[in-house]
DNA sequence: AATGAATGAGCATTCATTCAT
DNA sequence: TATGAATGAATGCTCATTCAT
């Protein structure tokens, strides 16, 4: 677990506007090119900040990347918190989640791409550092919703809540990537014949049928 | 579909042993570091072959990479073909698939890592080139099995076969990564509490329950 | 006509001394080895500058080469402008040109070598890019002088001014190379028996006799 | 002076047809790309001979180049010998030379290109090795013709025969390049406005006027 | 003698990081 | 604190030459 900051204190002192310029430029760069291929000098130029400054704010490239990832996770967490707090039926929740994925994947293609990059970076440290916060939140939310569903009788009791949450997230995670990442978009097309998952209602409907039935007693 | 070779004819002429040394070295390199960061000179050294030779066999780095990926896909295809040809009940097939994933992911960690790397390289050309070969086979197999299931009454008829195949593969793909890739391993642990999906029977059992129920009328 | 700069603005910002170190090192390298064989890393070392810096100043090897050539052309142009502006008799002008060639070829052997290399690089783009600036100036100067000669009666009127200028330059160009370039030096020796055109006055005298007579009515 | 062979005895033993295949392929390669950039492996492929064989015939790349140059010089020498032996008036001879240049430059662009490459190769050994044979022949021919002209009264006696021969060759050499080499073609265009020296008769006429007058008493 | 696969030093170019101003 | 010029190690790829068959 790694919740510590990855930037120097100086980064907190600069103006919000400058901070956002940096975050945006770096997010774009890393999302488009990945960590290894992302270029610090390009980020500096795009953010209209000097490289020297960047190195005043961050120890090195990796720390800038980690900071960016933190930010993108925070953005996603906001969305998730809304879903988590509602008291609805699990299937309603699932529908909300899917619709949120559809909406936010289109609005924040870069964040999703970045998340995708993150999941396959060949640096174990990155992976384990962030999997925790990112996933532990969704894991908890899904598991609680499933347990709640068991109580209300919406979910059969003979499946393991934690594992079911995992399966659910497998579906959601790939669905999310299918809206934003090259490989997954292509894959979606191969499976369903559609260019991108454009018929959102169809996707919602099919997913719900599948999941509802999977949970049903 | 892109089944053409990505190597020069010379690569077919060298000894099987040398060819395998190269394949292994390159698979290891690309699986660990990805395409961009994979180092041709390192591969040559690891394979005990000169760089010059490598460039006699492959036009460039990309073609070596593509060749490697082809090999890994072929390996997977063999497994899949066995599953495809059997005439069993869809649930038996699903079980077989999961057990195959469990077995081969452990045996061929590198291939799975390579596949994972491939899915997140930010190169659209790679994406479309490989999504097709990689996924079109599984897509077809799953869809046919589902359609067969509809006929035999094992699968409800109101779900879209193609989309259900996609959902199924979402689950399998992530499961596969969970056995071999750092991020996904960590994520599995967060969801289920287990270090790696070691309790294979538990995984099979839970997946089957979920999927069986999802398909059930 | 290609008078645009071939360097990045950064090259204008560095100290004159450093700029000259680079120009000198590169001129030497390219003059001795030609474009293809000239080595960027060697130039950097000779100029006591890092390769990285060189690439901050120039987009690539070709642009460094073009810049060098521009410099050498500018040097020559200064000399030519003096000759051009004078209002003298064409034969006086010819004598001045020859003496200028003699003087400058000895002083700037490298520039002449560079020009020689340039004329035979098998790169059409280089050729057309520079032939124009280099030659169009001399072409105009010679042609105007000849036309002026026709008016004053020093030059017969039945020869084509432009073509005569071309023939004149043929002689001058080879003369110039004869002072600086290995092949042409050897060739001069074979023709005249002299090691290098050392007896400058003899060369002047003979050339003048030949050209004067050629122009004479 | 270097008249020795630059190939191993083995090259004399192979079939004439194979020898010519090699000569042709190498001439093409070196004429188009120059010595440094000419590629031995490409030559072997083009000549349908193995690289190994090439190295059986020639010590190294340089010796292959030198051999090629020898051949091209021999070709030119044949032409020159014809001119040399005729007993004509010097101006008729000059006309013949120009027409020969015009004809052969178009027919054997590669040989001329090769000769051009040779004159600027930055390897002193090349230069001095070949200047001798190539130029000493023309030097002698031109000088003798001029001396003959002096006797017959066609050439003024106060010019140095050797130097006049040199000036003559300056004109011819550049004229030759103007028909075959990129830089010189461009330069010809700048001076005369014509794309290539296509109006051959005009060229002959103007050259003759110039040279005739230059020699005239 | 002929082959052509193998070699590996060499080169243009990139980019994370430093540091003088 | 901010700047951005400077650094140089690192990498994909080429090609003259060798040598086992």
Image (cartoon, coloured by chain):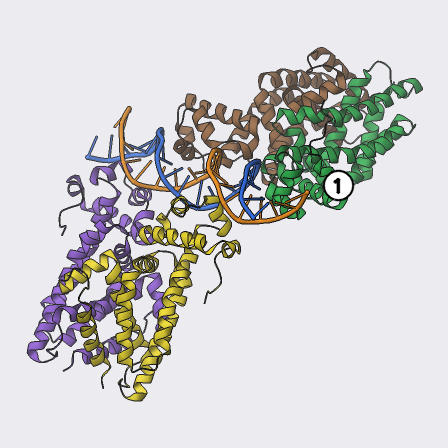
Chain colours: A purple, B yellow, C brown, D green, E orange, F blue
Give coordinates of residue C133: x percent, y percent.
60, 32
Which quadrant of the figure has residue C140? top right
**Depth check: D4 or D186 in front?**
D4
Residue at figure coordinates x 21%, y 55% from the top left: A72
Quadrant containing the C terminus of chain B in the rendered view: bottom left
**Depth check: A211 or B143 in front?**
B143
The reply, left or right, for residue C167 in relation to residue D155 is left
The reply, left or right, for residue B163 in relation to residue C74 is left
Residue at figure coordinates x 40%, y 63% from the top left: B130
Residue at figure coordinates x 71%, y 38% from the top left: D11
Q: Is residue B120 above or below residue A46?
A: below
Q: Is residue C34 above or below residue D152?
A: below
Query: Label 1's element?
Result: loop
**Depth check: E15 or C104 in front?**
E15
Residue C18 visible, this angle: yes
Return the residue at label 1: D108
Give coordinates of residue D123: x percent, y percent.
61, 27
């Amino acid at each position: 677990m790694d919740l510590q900051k990855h930037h120097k204190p100086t980064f907190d002192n600069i103006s919000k506007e400058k901070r956002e310029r940096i975050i945006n430029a770096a997010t774009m760069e890393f999302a488009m090119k990945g960590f290894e291929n992302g270029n610090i000098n390009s980020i500096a130029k795009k953010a209209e900040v000097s490289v020297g400054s960047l190195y005043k704010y961050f120890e090195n490239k990796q720390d800038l990347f980690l900071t960016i990832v933190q930010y993108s996770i925070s953005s996603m967490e906001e969305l998730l918190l809304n879903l988590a707090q509602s008291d609805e039926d699990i299937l309603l929740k699932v529908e909300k989640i899917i619709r949120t994925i559809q909406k936010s994947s289109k609005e924040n293609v870069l964040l999703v791409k970045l998340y995708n990059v993150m999941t396959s970076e060949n640096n174990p440290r990155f992976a384990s550092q962030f999997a925790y916060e990112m996933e532990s939140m969704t894991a908890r939310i899904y598991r609680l919703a499933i347990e709640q569903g068991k109580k209300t009788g919406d979910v059969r009791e003979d499946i393991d809540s934690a594992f079911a949450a995992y399966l659910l997230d497998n579906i959601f995670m790939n669905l999310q990537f299918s809206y934003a990442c090259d490989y997954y978009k292509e894959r979606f097309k191969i499976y369903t014949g559609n260019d991108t998952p454009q018929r959102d209602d169809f996707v919602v409907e099919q997913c719900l049928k599948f999941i509802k039935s999977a949970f049903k007693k």
